[in-house]
Amino acid sequence: MDWGTELWDQYDIIEKHTQSGLELVEKYVKFVKERTEIEQSYAKQLRNLSKKYNQKRSSKDEPDCRLSSYQSFLDILNEMNDYAGQRELIAENMIMNICIDLTKYLQELKQERKTYLLEAKKAQQCLESTYKQLDSSKKRFEREWREAERAAQYAEKTDQDINATKADVEKAKQQAHMRARVAEECKNDYASHLQKYNKEQSQFYFNDMPVIFNKLQNLDERRIQKLAQGYILFSDTEKHVMPIISKCLEGITKAGTNVNEKNDTMVVIEQNKSGFERPGDVEFEDYSQGINRASSDSSLGTPKGHMDILGKNKSKNLWLFKRSKKFTSERSMPTVMEDFGHLPPEQRRKRLQQKLEEISKELQKEADQSEALGKMKDVYEKNPQMGDPASLATQISQTSQNIERLRGELNKYETWLSEAGVRGDALRYRAHSFNNNGAHEVLSPDAAHSDESTPDPSQAIYAEFDDDFEDEERAAPIGKCTAMYNFPGASEGTISMEEGEVLAVVEEDKGDGWTRVRRHNGDEGYIPTSYVTITLNK
């Protein structure tokens, strides 16, 4: 079945249907284009999300990089970035294989349809022109035939008229004969036009228009077939990247299975092990001996010299704040930072070993450069045309200075490493008391090796008594300050504060950028001087 046979008289319907089909293609192209925009936006958001959480840092700046859970999270972010790339590929392929291809094909179909409709219109105009000629010849034949009839009737009437002369009769007959001949010519012309029109009409309805309709049918079927391929490509484009997307998802699953909690625990231990031993028991200090020195040794076995130790401890600043102040003031105490003395022994040894490896690599590099410069100088001396040996003097001198400097640093760090190895085994944490923050106050390394007698372990019995002594040790505030910004106080020895909070100033800034303050509940610590406005007592 075809349109030329079944729809021979439905030109308007065919024209409307083919136009509607082309509009459907345009609508589908627009749909796919909007889908690609969604894919591109989705991919962009995924990339931004991965970038936001994938802030690349060196292992020195981010110790957690060695943790499997942290590394797996980075792997997931990388897989998500690859996944976003596949979504972009889907959008790109849809644009190329569907939108651009269908748009180009649509333009060809529009032009082809326009050509067929013009052919149909031309054939219709040709048939209408022939029909007009036929109608004109028919009307002329009708008019001339009536004139011939009237001329014949007039000639007959004149012939019967007794008063008419022979000349009048002859003239009337000639006129009737002429009109009859003209009418016969018009009749023949009309018959000829009628035959021509019927032939062209048959050609129009049985040949020309069916061919055009069949061409339009073929065009519409090709449009439908191309549109169906576009529908399939809509699915196949995504199916094509599914294996890669599956690999991305498998990579995310693998990242989860690669997490090793035991290994992470070992990494945390390795990175943060201090090397100190656990604190021993707090020893009993019998203050009653100050009243009765002549009495025999206490039944609690209080060691001699305990009052001297107490006095010494009273006069010292707390190690917790003192050490924190040193290592937080990097700019004012560079030597402390250079030998990593602010770190616990285990971590200090590791950092010193890393520094030694870095210096050794630099030293080897300078030694290789020195050797190369020496060989080049020998070549210049033997072959002056290749270059002036004196031109290398500056470089050789600079390299020698660098080597001497690096050797000096190497010796310095080797000495520190040797000291760290001895001191790391000797240092011990010793709990003196608890401050108001609930943190242990730790004696300085000097106090840890004090020659004074060690307090008795039973000193914990007098914890409340010790607190009274601590209150006496506290210095009176020298002013107050108001926080201009929030400060987390995450580092050891610092104290947190919120914007607008009022704190008591215990110790002024010594030039290192830190001020010691006390909260109303007794908590003490250091804060950045630039974060507060200070008012000192007069």
Image (cartoon, rainbow, N blue to C red):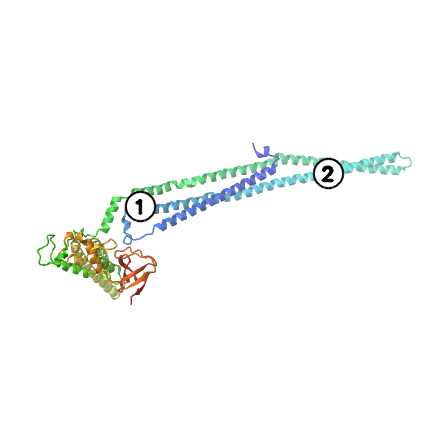
Depth order, front residue of 293/516: 293
Give 223 or 322, whichever is nearer the viewer. Answer: 322
Specify the farthest residue to the front.
Answer: 291
Relative to residue 466, is residue 149 drawn left or right? right
What numbered label is drawn on residue 137?
Answer: 2
The N terminus sits in image quarter: top right
Q: Position of residue 379 (x, y in %)?
A: 24, 61
Q: Quadrant of residue 94?
A: top left
**Residue to which mark 1 is pinned:** 72
Along the line of sight, the residue nearer the viewer: 151 or 458: 458
Which x, y percent locates residue 343? 22, 56
Residue at point 89% right, 37% down?
166
Distance, label 2 to label 1, CA atoms, is 96 Å
Residue 68 in view here: yes
Q: Position of residue 319 (x, y in %)?
A: 21, 58
Which label lies toward us, 2 or 1? 1
Instruction: Please state which amino acid type lies under the numbered disc 1.
Output: Ser
Q: Amino acid at mark 2?
A: Ser
Label 2 element class: helix
